[in-house]
Image (cartoon, rainbow, N blue to C red):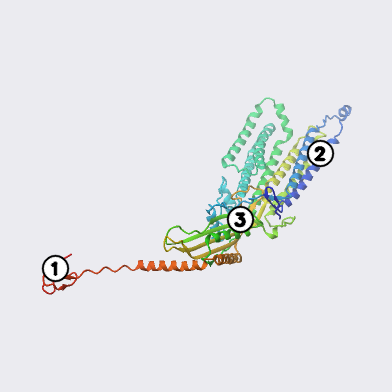
Amino acid sequence: MSMPWGLVGPAFDYPTPYAVENRILLLRGCALLLLALVLTLLVSFRPEAESGAAAALLGTDTELGSPVPVSLAAAFFAVLGVVNLVRASGQRRLLLEPGQPASLTSELLREAQGASPGAAWLQRALLNGAPEPMAVEGPWRAWLLRLAPDLGHWPRPLHAYLGRRLYHTLLCAGLLVVLAPVWWLATPVAVAVASLGLGSIVVGVVGASALNPQRKAGRPLALVMWLLLGLLVAAAAVLAVPKLPGQALLNLLVPLALPVALASLLWGLLMVEFMALLAGRAQLVPVAAGRIDSHDRELSPDAELGAFVKELDLELHRRWSEGVPNRRHAWQTPTLAATGERGRFNGVVLEESHPLLAAAARERPLAWPRWGTPEMWLVMMGVLCLAWTLMGGAFWTWQGWTQLRDAGAYWTKSGVGLALVVAAGHALRVSHLLWSRFEVESTLVWLEFQGEWLRPNAAVPATVQSHGVRVAVAQARSVFYAAAEHRLGSRTLRGLRGDDAAAQQWLQTLQRTASTLAQSQPDAAEKRRSREAAAAALAARAVAQASPPAAPPRPARYCSVCGTAVLAGARFCQHCGSSLPQG
């Protein structure tokens, strides 16, 4: 894996995950080009027409077929073969542009303060050692959760992929159910017209999804509408076609063997979609839960907070992977309040390094997957694709040989062959996303700062009394699909593992940075004396406020009759017994 730099920024050159797929594309492209060559040779050596006398003598009236259909088929297969070869050539490299793969959750702008909306989710994942599953959305949510209960832990492109596979499977099965009674009960012309309508539906729906892989799966209501349309087409063909004028023209559809071709196409697509469902489900391995411990340490309170934050930002910059900026999710720097006598300050930093392939996977060998791995389903689909391509070629060669010698021969073999070739191409198309799965590793750093400050009076600045830091570092393993769109939800966590050595290294680095900043300040000793004086002043003030002041002594009282001093609060003189005034 390398990272070339250019005018548009960096781009990671990943080892291509399409090595096996490219081999299948190469073999299929060569097979299609060989088929086109064989059909061209059949047209070139088309037999000459026999003399009329010989035909009359033998009592036969055989007409040679036109070379145009076979020539068009040869051109079609040649184009398909070239497309396969070009596609294989274009997949020899995989470039990921800046910002790819997508972040695990929403990010925070580097100039902003605070936390992104997804920072809390990421913090809970670090506390629990495992991520919370995403919500599975879409019209087929209940079906997908029954098929794959752990689907919430996997990227959203896989959700949409399995939804499309389920939608196409039900569509093909429903159209087969519609076709079966029509084929058995209706006339050949009606069956041909019904097959033409049903084939247009399945080719339109499945073809639109193949041309636009990011297209969302249709809703159940859309599936019901397509099936109702198929029923209407079949009913109209059965009831109205026998009554239409121009039956001779409609009879030309019978030799094309459209019901056989449609049945072959539906069975092929049904098998491909079902295998793709199993292949997608096979990739859903359980999430690996881990344990992430946090580590605390006291820092020097003499270090200026502003300078400490700048050094922290530079240290994070120095630890960027391959020079790519970290994905920042929280950046709340510790600040002191402008008013008040005492208080606490807090700060949070949460960043993720750029996800990279593991060292062992950076040079991916061009080997076939081992049996039992999730990729074996994809290999089986590739082998099935090659087998169907060869079978389709054999059917078309047989049909070309027969049709060029007898124009009245039915096109049954060519219809089956074309259906097999189309189904084989669809198998390659739907397996492309699953081939592009990557597992990458990144580093999550979570720093929390907290401390206490004092201000004896409003005329002096606040002084930091204590400063501590808590560090948690985890190695995160995530998965994404390179062939899908890179947006939020396209990459998900697959496991977290605490990295205590990296956490201790961070603690040592922060402690060393705070100590260096404290020693480099010329007024460090004055700051310590100010801190001690502020603490002493606030402590004395607290003691003074805790003990209530003594009540002032009352003035002495004397009897107005005999002049003797009397007790405080007395109502009568204890010497002469005279009544004393109150108040």
Residue 109: x %, y % from top left: 57, 51
Between 548 and 505, the one nearer to me in the picture: 548
Give whichever of discs 2 and 3 has the lower sequence position. Answer: 2
Give whichever of discs 1 and 2 has the lower sequence position. Answer: 2
Figure check: 75 above or below 331: above
Q: Amino acid at mark 1?
A: Leu
**Res 410 visible:** yes
Q: Secondary structure at mark 1?
A: loop
**Res 495 visible:** no
The quarter of the picture where residue 195 lies is top right
Distance from the alpha carbon under mark 3 to that under mark 1: 88 Å
What residue occupies the far bottom of the structure in this picture?
575
Residue 576: x %, y % from top left: 10, 73
What residue occupies the far front of the structure in this picture?
522
The quarter of the picture where residue 229 lies is top right
Label 2 vs label 3, nearer the camera? 3
Residue underneath mark 1: 580
Residue 182: x %, y % from top left: 65, 36
Q: Secondary structure at mark 3?
A: loop
Q: Quadrant of the N terminus?
A: bottom right
Q: Amino acid at mark 2?
A: Leu
Q: Residue at x 69, y 37 (%)?
A: 259
Dot 3 alpha-carbon crowd within 10 angstroms: few under 14, some 14 to 19, many 20 or more: many
Dot 2 alpha-carbon crowd within 10 angstroms: few under 14, some 14 to 19, many 20 or more: many
Distance from the alpha carbon under mark 2 to that under mark 3: 57 Å
Instruction: In the rendered structure, find residue 326 and report the number of the disc placed on it.
Output: 3
Q: Quadrant of the C terminus?
A: bottom left
Instruction: In the rendered structure, find residue 81 and report the number of the disc placed on it.
Output: none
The quarter of the picture where residue 52 lies is top right
Q: Residue at x 57, y 42 (%)?
A: 220
